[in-house]
Amino acid sequence: MTAPRRRGGAAGAVQDREPVLEVEDLRVSFATFDGVAEVLNGVSLEVRPGQRVGLVGESGCGKSVTMRAIMGILPERAARIRGRLRFEGRDLLTMSRAQRQALKGNAMSMVFQDPMTSLNPVFRIGEQLSDIVRWADRRRGEHRTGNARRARILEVLEQVRLPDPARILDAYPLQLSGGMRQRVLIAMALLNRPRFLIADEPGTALDVTTQDEILRLLNDLVRDERLALLMITHNLGVVREMTDHVYVMYAGNVVEEGTTAEIFAAPAHPYTRALFACVPKLSGGRAFAGIDGTLPDYTQPPDGCRFHPRCPHAGERCLTLPPAFAIGGSHRSACWLHEGEGGAA
Amino acid sequence: MSQVGIGLSSARAEESARRRAWRRSWYRFRRNPAAVVGLAMVALVVLAALAAPLLAPSPQSAGTYVNFAERHQPPSLHHLFGTDNVGRDVFSRVLYGYRVSLLLVVFVLGLSVPFGVLLGLLAGYYGGWVETVIMRVTDIFLAIPALVMALAITAALTPSLLNAMIAISLLWWNWHTRLIYTTVSSLRNEDYVEAAKLAGAGDAHILFREILPNCVSVISVKVTLDAGFVILIGAGLSFLGLGARPPTPDLGTMVASGANYLPEDWWESVLPGLGILFAILGFNLLGDGLRDLLDVEVS
Amino acid sequence: MTPEPILQVRDLRKLFPVRRGLFQRVVGHVRAIDGVGFEVQRGEIFGLAGESGSGKSTLARIVVGLSTPTSGSIRFGGEEVATLRGTRAFRRRVQMVFQNPGSSLNPRRSIQQTLQVPLHFSGLEPARWDQRAAELLEMVELPAAFRSKYPFELSGGQKQRVAIARALAVGPELLVLDEPTSALDVSVQAKVIELLVRIRNELNLSYLFISHDLSLMRNFTSRLAVMYLGKLSEVGFTGDVFTAPKHPYTQGLISSVPVVSAEEAALKPVVERIRGEIPSPTNVPPGCSFHTRCPQCFEPCREADPTFRGAGFEHAVRCHLYPEGDGA
């Protein structure tokens, strides 16, 4: 999973566009009490304009760390980052702090997870949104009048389908419902016309009916604004309905990737298959398999494939980290079981 | 799950739970340089107090010793802090003075903290009229300025160290009551308290075995900061002549009597004053980092 | 085997007063539970599905006796809970597993100490505590050595197992499980559910399983009830409710669930989406409480609160769309 690929196929034109975000062999480690935790062990992924990419994995797999590394919000003191992170061709890791800051909240934006805690309860919505616009302007060296800011804010609030946006401006966060707050968070992310958006577990803090609406809103916005969307989630159902391309993560590695259709039709990697087996099905018929064992200790990770201690198919070869083997179309699996199916990438 | 998803390996699991918890807390504490300095300072003060007879170059200076030949000597190798108006070694007296300060701390806090915490537990847990009665009485005491009241009480009774300690204790418990009351009010709704009730636990068990252990870090931080304040108030009372009586070496008294000889023989007043500062600063810095040491939860 | 109800809830209500102003005057009530009735048969897993604000957690606490109802009756094994509450006999028969494993174990107490609490207060002699704790841990598939650990050393799944062990310590007959796996990853959830199934079979327990996760309900429960704003909207056998949901709310819920396969997607009812969000329980809409969001709302819905109707309560629904009758 290294060099960018050019591929035709079902995805059509999207695959031919230049990627907005390129992550290549990202490695992140933290200094901790127990030693150095090698959290990300060479993560590679890409997001193209108009493409909805899912990064799916369970808690502790490193998807949050990946997200923070991309947005540049890792705790600098403790983290060591290696690898390549490119946004629209520019290297994020070598650019100056000021340049990186200019991207944050502007071209690269994020929708936070929890609408309850991400909004400051003592300030009105209008003030918080206005601040965001002002700071972004300042970073770009521009200036707008208060009225121009207000116009932009109202425009975005309408875009996220909030009823009566003018009233929302004067409201405090606690006066809004959970669904409305989530829409405000999405509005915050869109204010400065980003080209790339990360959605962190969107809707998990909401009821399933509200979550459904929010996800469809996000879908429409991505399509209308031709955004590149990276969605972080642990919910496979959401991935199926909301993404075109998926990366499955386990313990700091991408273990499987492909189009959503490919992965859901035939999950290949043992971890992915086990994960699918654990999801309760609406069709009934109880499938409570579970996966034996626990996540590895990142300060003493297993050699080679980090899943092998829990894998029913583990063997000698697994002590060496497998590369991603192509298994048809854009579908790749980092497992020795799939060696030779389509040739190593 | 921790932010970086650190799991448990079997090798680590063998080390006993308690020891790991302590090592981890110590690790976090160590990263707070102010707190480490504070701990060192407090350790020195405690050491000085405990081992004063051994450490003091001139133990007799703590008593009724006089040596007019060596009056008003400035600080030197022979007398680290110089000598006072009757020739006693100031350094030795400061060391012994710490005994008085710490005795005050132990007495006052030893009385007022358990009392205040108990009242806070009861008020926070039971609510209703218990809470009303306790908290209104607490409010009344809180409204009285401690130092002024201590002055009044010791002036009314015969000024002595013991009376000063009693006076300060009478006004100290209310702060702890209020603090614990607010802490317990939120803790009593925790799931593990409900689970204990479901398991049949009585009130006594819940108060002292479930809730109180979760107040320990709050109490400890407050007690450490209190120590500094108690020393300060005690020194203040002594300075005004309402605390320890001569010849008991007391830092506040030394500052007062040494003040007569300012500014030429500055060391007789200033150095005991710095001794007070050293002790208070140490406790304050320590209190800062103590929460890290005591909080068992991993972030 | 004739079904024997272990838990009978009749017309349960729980109102919380809302106080405003300087003198804390009561200005209204939160109708957290507003006339709920159902039965759990001995040995079955009965599900209570609902979203936030439905009142299901309040109901859970009332069933185990942590809270008292404003009116209505709860009978456990034939006896009123109101009289049983707080007694040791009752505690031994009904226990609860809480939602958040992080907060249901006292962070300052070791696992041994936490497990000892129910043992202590149910009269077991201290000499036997250590051994019994080891047995309990074994029952939930944790090593006995975990006794000396503290909660912060355990993962979410492990903590939840300890919580289950604690609930089992007194040998209850009914376990109330309040969203026991909501905070867990799906692979961990699968193992915990597997454990719960095994324990139920081995110990002949009955479960009242509360969750907002419908897919989990589908697989784990034999009968279920759907709750909305303090009232039950539909009750029936799980298979029936999912294959032929009657209430528009149930239909909307099921169709909103994100599924992982096309087969499942085909099973979802094709209905118009539910509008808006759940109203605040202080402001329950008049008539049928769901009518403000219901895509099939018509005249009677705004005026009258529907009664339960349907096949002798085997698959009952509280909705004007269905003819009255077929049930008391």
Image (tube, rainbow, N blue to C red):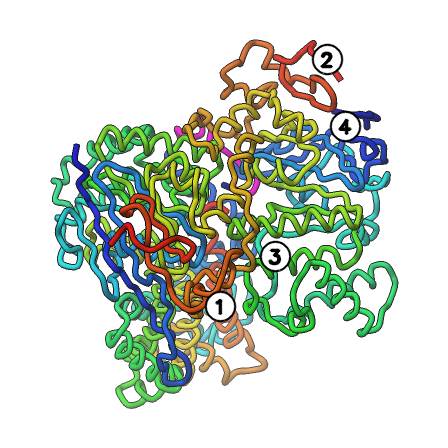
Q: Report if residue B96 is visible in the image.
A: no
Question: In this rendering, would A135 be left or right of B183?
Answer: right
Real-space CA distance between mark 4 and mark 2, rounded to the nearest whole angstrom = 18 Å
Same-chain status of marks 1 and 2: no
Residue A10 badge: 4
**Could you tell me which residue is drawn at 66 percent across and 47 percent down?**
A199
Provide the chain ID for the residue under circle 1: B
Q: Report if residue C207 is visible in the image.
A: yes
| x and y, in percent, of residue A254 in the image | 65, 28
**Any magenta on residue B6?**
yes
Q: What's the magenta region?
A: B3-15
Residue B275 badge: 1
Which secondary structure lies at badge 1? helix
| x and y, in percent, of residue A249 in the image | 61, 31
Q: Nearer the viewer, residue A263 or B82?
A: A263
Amino acid type of disc 3? Gln
In this rendering, the label closer to the viewer, 1 or 2: 2
**Could you tell me which residue is drawn at 62 percent across and 52 percent down?**
A214
Residue A342 badge: 2
Question: Main SS of the magenta segment?
Answer: loop
